[in-house]
Image (cartoon, grey):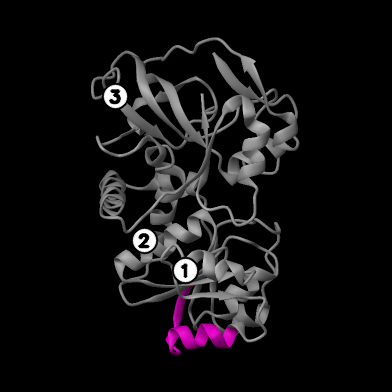
């Protein structure tokens, strides 16, 4: 079978290459999937670069999420059937023609949900809805996030709106405001405007902002914290710009703020089955009623990984880049 492998850490477009690998066999409690589509996530690229929290042994496989069709069943697997579509969001090595995955963690895909949507269901949308729960906000509350034009930022705005949570989004260029407006997302402020804080205040009407999400790092983290009310919570979700958060100690002290991290790989496995099921049920509902959308920026053959990475890294990209095997 074909698989994307990198012998060293480095720029993904340079080190990733197609190699022939043996067809894997499922052990007890596992299934083998024929991969249909797999998205490119930032954390996948960070892993290839060697800069993520997980660092595989070299030469390493790549990719973590996929839509697949059940191809073979391991012993003891009775709730899935050969030919059934399922999604996985935590199977390392997903950038391959075939993968094996633990059957208990797979998500059966309802009929009628397009492959392009199902392929990106777990990692980003489920992280976004779990993050919203993690913030412990209720209907009518206000939250703020940077990287509002990123995949999770856009989903968090849509999911928050569906729950009645008011979401203010920060972007770093004014063009991002119109890009999001075209997707039906408003309450966006560009921090390249001198009066950006006043603009946020005008949007909220002076209402307290209970929580903030930082996906950028650096000075952007401090911008988010500066907007929070007393007792507010700043959640570090990503570090697209800098691995260091630049936050004012005065804001932490005088606001009595809480700063904590969210890593889906740690938070999601800790969810109880009832909560996990309810959140997935809500995702399917939001996708079916159109309040949550998962656009696709492009689909590339795995052999064109260099072009796919370039497309994924394009500024202003709307939607995920998917790999086909």
Residue 178 higher or lower than 79, as above or below: below
Query: According to the image, label 2 marks what residue?
Result: 159
The residue lying at 53 percent from left, 64 percent from top is: 179
Residue 46 higher or lower than 223, as above or below: above
Q: Position of residue 265 (x, y in %)?
A: 49, 44
Mark 1 residue element: helix
Mark 3 residue element: loop
Q: CA distance from mark 1 to mark 3?
A: 37 Å
Q: Earlier in the sequence, mark 2 or mark 3?
A: 3
Q: CA distance from mark 1 to mark 2?
A: 16 Å
Q: Earlier in the sequence, mark 1 or mark 3?
A: 3
Is 19 situated left or right of 84 in this image? Answer: right
The range drawn in magenta is 197-211
Residue 73 higher or lower than 284, as above or below: above
Nearer the observer, 191 or 239: 191
Q: Position of residue 207 (x, y in %)?
A: 42, 86
Q: Position of residue 321 (x, y in %)?
A: 54, 41
Query: According to the image, label 3 marks what residue?
Result: 84
**Marks 1 and 2: which is nearer the front?**
1
Q: Earlier in the sequence, mark 1 or mark 2?
A: 2
Residue 267 higher or lower than 208, as above or below: above
**Quadrant location of the N terminus in the rendered image:** top right
Query: According to the image, label 1 marks what residue?
Result: 181
Name the image quarter holding residue 214. bottom right
């Amino acid at each position: 079978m074909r698989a994307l492998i990198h012998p060293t850490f480095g720029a993904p477009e340079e080190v990733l290459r197609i190699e022939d690998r043996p067809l894997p066999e499922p052990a007890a409690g596992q299934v083998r999937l024929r991969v249909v589509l797999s998205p490119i996530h930032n954390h996948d690229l960070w892993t290839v670069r060697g800069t993520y929290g997980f660092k595989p042994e070299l030469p390493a496989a790549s990719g973590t999420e996929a839509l697949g069709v059940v191809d073979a069943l391991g012993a003891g697997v009775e709730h899935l059937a050969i030919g059934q579509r399922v999604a996985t969001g935590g199977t390392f090595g997903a950038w391959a023609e075939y993968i094996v995955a633990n059957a208990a963690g797979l998500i059966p895909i309802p009929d009628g949900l397009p492959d392009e949507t199902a392929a990106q269901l777990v990692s980003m949308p489920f992280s976004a809805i779990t993050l919203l729960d993690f913030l412990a906000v209720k209907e009518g509350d206000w939250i703020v996030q940077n990287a509002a034009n990123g995949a999770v930022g856009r989903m968090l705005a849509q999911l928050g709106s569906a729950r009645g949570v008011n979401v203010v989004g920060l972007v770093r260029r004014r063009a991002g405001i119109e890009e999001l407006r075209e997707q039906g997302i408003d309450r966006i402020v560009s921090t390249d405007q001198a009066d950006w804080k006043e603009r946020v205040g005008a949007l909220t009407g002076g209402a307290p902002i209970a929580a903030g999400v930082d996906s950028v790092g650096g000075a952007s983290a401090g911008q988010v914290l500066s907007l929070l009310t007393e007792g507010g919570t700043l959640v570090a979700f990503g570090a697209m710009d800098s691995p260091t958060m630049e936050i004012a100690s005065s804001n932490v002290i005088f606001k009595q703020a809480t700063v904590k991290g969210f890593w889906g790989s740690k938070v999601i496995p800790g969810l109880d089955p009832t909560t996990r099921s309810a959140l997935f049920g809500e995702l399917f509902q939001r996708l079916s009623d159109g309040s949550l959308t998962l656009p696709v920026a492009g689909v590339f053959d795995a052999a064109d990984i260099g072009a796919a990475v370039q497309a994924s890294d394009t500024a202003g990209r709307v939607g995920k880049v998917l790999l086909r095997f």
